[in-house]
Image: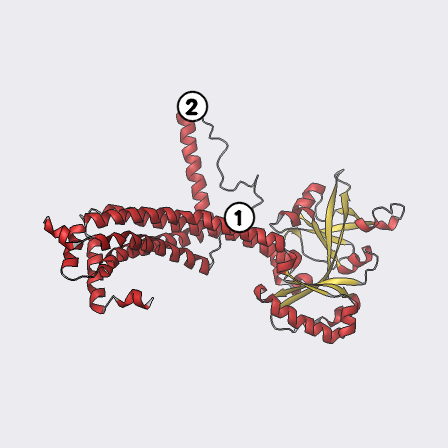
Amino acid sequence: MKNFFSKLTISNIRWVIFIAARSFSKKHSKSRASSMLSIFEIAAGALALTVIIAVMNGFQLGFIENILEISSYYIRIDNFPREYISKIDAIKNINGVTAIDPFIETQGIVSSNFELTQSAVVLRGLTESAFEGDAGLKKHLIPLSGSLNLTGANTVLLGAELAIRLGVETGDDIEFVSITNIFSAEDSGTVNSLKVSGIFRSGYYEYDASWGFINLDEALEIEGGKETCTLGIKLKNRFADAAAMYEIQQVLKSVFGEYEFNKYNIELTSWRDYNKSFFNALRTEKLLMFVLVGLVFVVVAVNIYQSQRRNVLEHSEDIGLLRAIGAHDFSVRWIFALKGLIIGFIGATGGVLLAILISTHIQEFFLFMEAFVNTVLQIFYIISSGIFSGTAGFSVFSKKIFYIQEYTARLIFHEVVIIYFFAVLSAFLAAWFASARISKIKPSEVLRYE
């Protein structure tokens, strides 16, 4: 790397920058049109990649946050004895822990008197203070009717889609049969009557269609007085889970003692392991999308490479003259490389700034796109006298197909920086390799014919 830049002295840098800037800004330059086209292509590529990745981040992070905040938590402690629940304050005092929820899950069949349908359901038992002590859980469960309250006896919170399927509203009664007792129909105690105290929507279809929440004590009673439960732990930074798990394990061993800790077979699970297959699938999907859309930079780089090669041929006389007066071919190559750098810088800056603007107003952007496309379809419908149907309407993400309440886009700083960097780098490298032909130009042969 030192040898690469050692040939560029201060005086060389000055005239290289001067000639590159002058060549790029010449209004009647033959290469100006191709440079403008290259800038547009770089900008379009950076714009498309940034917006697509931002929209994908919006969907994926929405799913991930719903799973972590509602279902899996950041760290789970399984097989935790009920008799030690009063001692979980020791875990709350660990630095980085924001909430801790004891819970138990029971699965079964739920039915109502209004619809002759039954549905599988997961009922999670939480403490009465769960929604007040866990801000993340409360944020992601939006009450549509009733309230997020588990203080009432024999009450249940149902997901919106499940409530629609059962045909129930707040205040109605449902019947629940636990899967553990479903084969003991002669035991009348297996049928539990619950009153719907609230209906929620999370934005994640699985939870809205098959989940409910009840009081922890009632869930334990349904499960026959189970002696253990699970602790769900939230952290300020979910990526600090390894350090937090180590501290939690040390605290638990001090509370239980080494023997008791091993006796209860207490297990700590990170969110990475609990949702490993799903999160890996999302990561692979995002990586492949990044690569596929990023191929636009390869196409742009090839175009810049060809245009700069043509530019070298067109300026062979000028190059020969510079070489004749003592300019090193390395310095002359930097003239074309700087032109590529300028193209990449202008195109990437314009594209990324426009992408940030669109991503921060993605709702308005999609509404504009839908209105524009529907207007065009309507015009075609009128012109064609009904041959082309425009009455159905166009939607970017139709709610009939996608379970989406609103459009979201999230920009991640390091991803934007990577896109910007590769946009500039692709233009620079294309111009640099295209200028390799300069070393083959001999000043004596060029100037002989002048």
- Please say whether residue 59 is visible from this viewpoint: no
300 left or right of 396 in image: left
SS for callout 1: loop
Query: Could you give the CA–CA distance between mark 1 and mark 2, rounded to whole angstroms?
Result: 35 Å
Label 1 belongs to which residue? 406
Residue 253 locus on image (x, y percent)? 73, 73
Q: Quadrant of residue 422?
A: bottom left
Q: Residue at x 61, y 49 (%)?
A: 204
SS for callout 2: loop
Mark 1: few, some, or many residues within 10 Å (few <14, many ≥20)?
Answer: few
Residue 343 locus on image (x, y percent)? 29, 53
Q: Which mark is residue 385?
A: 2
State the residue in front, 260 or 371: 260
Q: Quadrant of residue 243?
A: bottom right
State the residue in front, 55 or 8: 8
Q: Earlier in the sequence, mark 1 or mark 2?
A: 2
